[in-house]
Amino acid sequence: MSTFQDLGLNEDLLRAITDLGFEKPSEVQAKAIPLLLEEDKDLVALAQTGTGKTAAFGFPMLQKIDVDSRTTQGLILSPTRELCLQITNELKLYGKYCKGLNVTAIYGGASISDQARSVKRGAQIIVATPGRMKDMISRNMVDISKIQYSVLDEADEMLNMGFKEDITDILSHTPDDKSTWLFSATMPREVASIAKNFMYDPIEITVGNKNESTNQVSHEYYLVNARDRYQALKRLSDANPEIFSVVFCRTKRDTQKVAENLIEDGYNAGALHGDLSQNQRDLVMKSFRNRQIQTLVATDVAARGIDVDNITHVIHYQLPDEPEIYTHRSGRTGRAGKTGISMAIVSKSEVRKIKSIERIIKKQFEKKEIPSGSDIVEVQLMALANKIHTTEINHEIDKHLESINELFADTEKDELIKKFFSVEFNRFFNYYQKSKDLGVVQSRDSDRDGGRDYGRSSNDTRYFINIGSKDGFDWMKMKDFLKEQLELGRDDVFKVDVKDSFSFFNTENELKEKILAFFTDFKHNGRFVNVEVSENRGGGSRGGRSGGRGRGGNDRRSGGGSRRRDDKPRGDRRSSDRGDRRSNDSRGDRRSSGSGNRSDRRRSDDNRSDRRSSDRRSESNGSGSDRPRRSRRRD
């Protein structure tokens, strides 16, 4: 089928299609529309974002409902306010020649009474977010007991956002004999469960492969030190003068911070996240559509439903926690047959995430280097030259030519060109002439720590935390605990080493201030949790022993620990008699473990003149020299 006329749509819809300039149906439209028009069946459609899914379910619903009836016949659930409004507006455009059609949007952040009045006037189709829809059902403001068609749009994202219970509750108020159409970009287990529980023998259509990314988008990643992430973002923007992009961050706080920094540095940027009011969101999106904002910095949730033409780049300032979310992000570009570029800025610990994403999207990333300062200056200079070359002359300037010619009467052509272009050239040249190279050397991945180099030149900080296995933690639970409390990505915390009553972990240096500030007066299960910077890099902390604080420097080199087995380096073993060593070391372990005993403290005091202050603190606290110096934290 090559045209919309071949799909079986009526004249009213075909007239609207002509007005909208649609020429050929997309693959998902060509597959779904005839099936949905032919009979009332349940449908599961898997297609990437930007492939025309709204029209795929919108045209059949508009053709099958009775516009002369005021009864609500169709319900479309979508994950966000932005997508809800987008679907509503598109359906109104599709049905512009369907007299009597009333499509009502129901979403949070707007007047619930106004929305209820619109429904009562006779809304044949309701487009809603799950939270507001559930609220209106509980208040008896809507009646969906007679609907014939229900659509779950972006079903995977709704489930990611925790709407499963709301969806279940909403669908319980609908008739069993309705047709349910589920549209999703990916097919995780949760979506399959929804299809199994709420649909009867559904037809399944797939555009491309499940979870696969569209062929219209190329994928690149740039390896940088975490502290250089923002500088890398600026360079990627500067190296693409015509960029019109969406930048994705994981948290609302990072989104706002990055947007504010870009604005301060002279970029046309704006932030889109859940803390904005509906009016603020509308203003940001209006500015973005009008290209007054060139770079939109957004969270994953807030960006759902962004349908803006000609987005050239998607930049992943931070990779998502779930690889499937990458598919949704990259789908913001390469829409409607156009090409786009998806760029990921990654640190060493995130390289393995790239491999996971490649398996899911079935596409290969191209590793690229962050552009150098000289590269950016050249690109910007040629972009300006091309812009001048193609600029249409405004002859209103003619009346000023005499004065301009007099000013440059003694200036040679080459000199005039140099002066003209130096206005723009100098700005970038002065900024980038002494800039450093942001690229880093990629090391081999390790299974637990993401391939980081833990030598003393590494760009990471090691911390002590006073909770451990006695508090119910293993290394994975500790990693999850820190991630949730600090709103970090899973790979932002690494080299986790859990002991009985304390633990160690590493992060990039740029997170140090945030982590130390967060764990000031922080309590977990009623006790204070203390986090301090450790002096030990963590190279041998698994193999050290908690005992023997007075037995020389060997245990301090190994980093401390709570194991009693003799797994120190052979050169550190002081005794050849296994029985003596077991009895002596076990007594030493008991004396030095926990908070220490009085004899240890007296021994520490007696030898104070021969020991560094950090060793004294290590003895009195009984945790080894991998424990940090408290005085530094207080400072």
Image (cartoon, grey):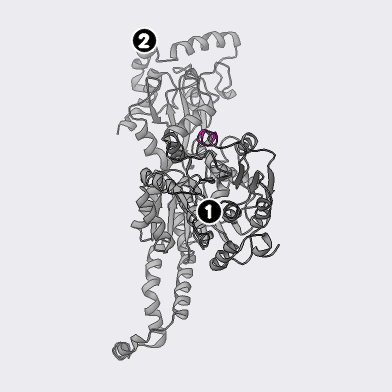
Residues under numbered marks 1 and 2 in contact, where contact means CB atoms less than 8 Å apart: no
- Which one is nearer the viewer's eye here, 445 or 568? 445
Task: Identify which residue is drawn at 47% across, 11% down.
Answer: 590
Q: Is residue 370 above or below residue 22?
A: above
Q: Number of numbered discs present?
A: 2
Q: Give the range drawn in magenta.
A: 165-172
Looking at the image, which residue is at 67% across and 57% down? 30
Q: Which of the pair 265/6 is nearer the observer?
A: 6
Where does the image place residue 197, in percent across and percent down from the top left?
A: 62, 34
**Which mark sits nearer the N-terminus, 1 or 2?**
1
Closer to the camera in the image, 450 or 85: 85
- Residue at which label 1 appears: 67
Q: Is residue 177 magenta?
A: no
In percent of width and height, residue 148 lies at 58, 44
Report the side of 404 relative to 453 (left or right).
left
Q: In this view, does 166 lie above or below 624?
A: below
Q: Residue at x 40, y 46 (%)?
A: 115
Quadrant location of the C terminus? top left
Q: What's the residue type where badge 2 is placed?
A: Arg
Residue 466 in view of the camera? yes
Q: Quadrant of residue 231?
A: bottom left
Tag 2's secondary structure? helix
Image location of residue 106, percent across then percent down = 44, 46
Q: What residue type is labelled 1?
A: Val
- The location of residue 93, given as percent across then percent down, is 50, 60
SS at badge 1 = loop
